[in-house]
Amino acid sequence: MADTLNYLREYGNTGLAEAPFSEVDNLAICQIAYLDFTGIVPAPGHGSVTIQQAWRRYQDLRGEEGIYGLTGMGTPLAPFVLQAMAGGKRFADARLRAFIQVMAPQRHEQFAALTLELPDGTAYVAYRGTDDSLSGWREDLMLSYEVVPAQRDALVYLRRVTQEISGRLRVGGHSKGGNLAAYAAAFLPDEARGRIAEVWCNDSPGFDRDVVDFGRLEAMADRTRLLTPEYSVVGSLMEHAVAPEFVTSSDRGIEQHSMMGWQTEGCRLARGRGILPEAIRMDAIFTQLLRERDLEGRRAFVDDIFGALEATGATTLTGYSEKGPAAIEITMAHLGTRDPTTRSQVRNLLLALVGEAVISTVVPAIGGEGALGDDEVRVGINHEAAEEVSVDKLHRRQGRRHRAKSRMAPVLAIKAMLQSEALRSAAALVAGILILANVGKDEPVLGYIMVTTVAVYSAFLLVRYITARRSGEDADPEDLAIGVVTAVPAVAVVFLRVAVSAFYNLVLGGALLVWGIKLARQGHVRSVHEFLGALHNARMLDGLLAIVLGIVVLINPMEIQAWSQAFAGTYIAWHGVWGLITR
């Protein structure tokens, strides 16, 4: 299976005179539009740099994190596309210019663009697609009811480019960038519009006829190309002036939105059969949100949903997804006055948006393991100071991050549970029931459950480390260290069964103590006087009771009395029930 990087390896030293500009060249340029070229590519009216110079400066200014740490909706392979373009005569001497990047949350705008002057005398104006910011995604939905700030800036940008450079122009972008390209090209003055040779829309959303003059878009239809994968959600939004050309991807599901998985056959993209049924179902979620509302209804809905998203304190989809179930609960609570249908639609949309963010940040490479190929990309610049970089190194580095995330999964799961009032209450109820189940019994069930969980987790880490070593992969020594450390207490408990009771009761007592202190702190008590004065507060009494009970359990965990255990179980279970009732 071949992709954009394979194409650049094969045709990187083939000039445009020998192999004319292709649809895969279009993908390569749209990929590098996701890179932050601040301080690397001059702003409009301030000259230009070659692709080779841009790559050298990118390495110097962005370093390891810029090359191997790209996150958000841009593919982590974008730096390697720039590197590959710089390593062959097809693009090495092409000139980048007029880089602009705008992030203005106050007016809900995310916009970036750059221009590449090609050796054949033409130029390609590339608009960046949606990034990871909530402002960017809000602007995407705003397309359904108004001309957005990014569209206006895209038109201003293209008009300026037509004034600064001569020759034929290609205009394009990925995702929202393709929409900006189509809008800017269609609404140029007639004379400048005649210089547009092609408009490339790569899985980009369409337009609403009530918002824009569709006749202007249709006038450019003969020069517009709409490329979409078989699983297309973004590219299916609203209406296009041209029919889509379906392409195949090595990725699955919504991951196909990433261009790095799109498959190539020589100088063209491999063609697909059409949109997949599962993509149609996914698209229905967004379509339902739009078709059931007029323009003002859509505006109110978008204001509501993004106001609720921002109520969580998140500014990006990644930040939102990292908050776990608590974020969705806060969002739904913020929309508590909305009708059930709207709440259901919002929940479905949130799951879709969070899924998009997770895919772009957790998956080791958006192009998929198969799209990476078997070889490293080794087409670095020929100067001694350049550090050789490779897709293989990116794969290893992101593999380590992925393993680190999996090690933290139990901790993050507990954190998410504690952040969610409903889940916290349910967990308290279950814990109380388990404690009550142990009253009068010699072998504590809860203790065995905790020990078993620790043992399974340590075994998972040790097996993963051993498997990686045997297969010759990059085994992580942290897996071995953490696996051994967590296995020791589990093994000790297995051989000293009496320790289960102590382990169980120590955890119970410690939890009660921490819980009580937290409740006491909520009363803003800083001294003994304030403490005595706050005893009339029911929450303070509750906290004091938890502290006393925790101390009683901790004093002699080996011989805890049945009555205290029963009281602790009842106390915790009641908190769970009360939390679920009052939520």
Image (cartoon, grey):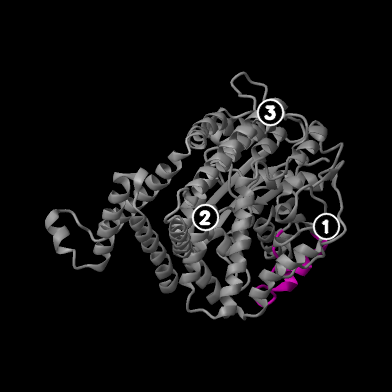
What residue type is disc 3 on?
Glu
Residue for badge 3: 473
Structural distance between the alpha carbons of marks 3 and 2: 34 Å
Neighbour tally class for label 3: few under 14, some 14-19, many 20 plus, Cα within 10 Å: few
Range of magenta residues? 204-223
Measuring from the top left, give residue 393's x and y in whole percent.
65, 30
Which quadrant is home to the N terminus?
top right
Which label belongs to residue 8? none
Which quadrant is home to the C terminus?
bottom left
Query: First in sequence: mark 3 or mark 2?
Result: 2
Q: Is residue 314 visible?
A: no
Q: Quadrant of residue 46?
A: top right
Residue 258 is left or right of residue 308, and the answer is right
Q: Quadrant of residue 374?
A: top right
Measuring from the top left, give residue 318's x and y in whole percent.
54, 52
Measuring from the top left, give residue 212's x and y in whole percent.
66, 72
Query: First in sequence: mark 2 or mark 1?
Result: 1
Neighbour tally class for label 1: few under 14, some 14-19, many 20 plus, Cα within 10 Å: many
Residue for badge 2: 316
Residue 393 is left or right of residue 376, and the answer is left
At a point 48% along the width and 79% down the height, the residue shown is 337
Secondary element at tag 1: strand
Residue 217: say if magenta: yes
Secondary element at tag 2: loop
Do residues under tags 3 and 2 come within 8 Å of each other at their CB atoms?
no
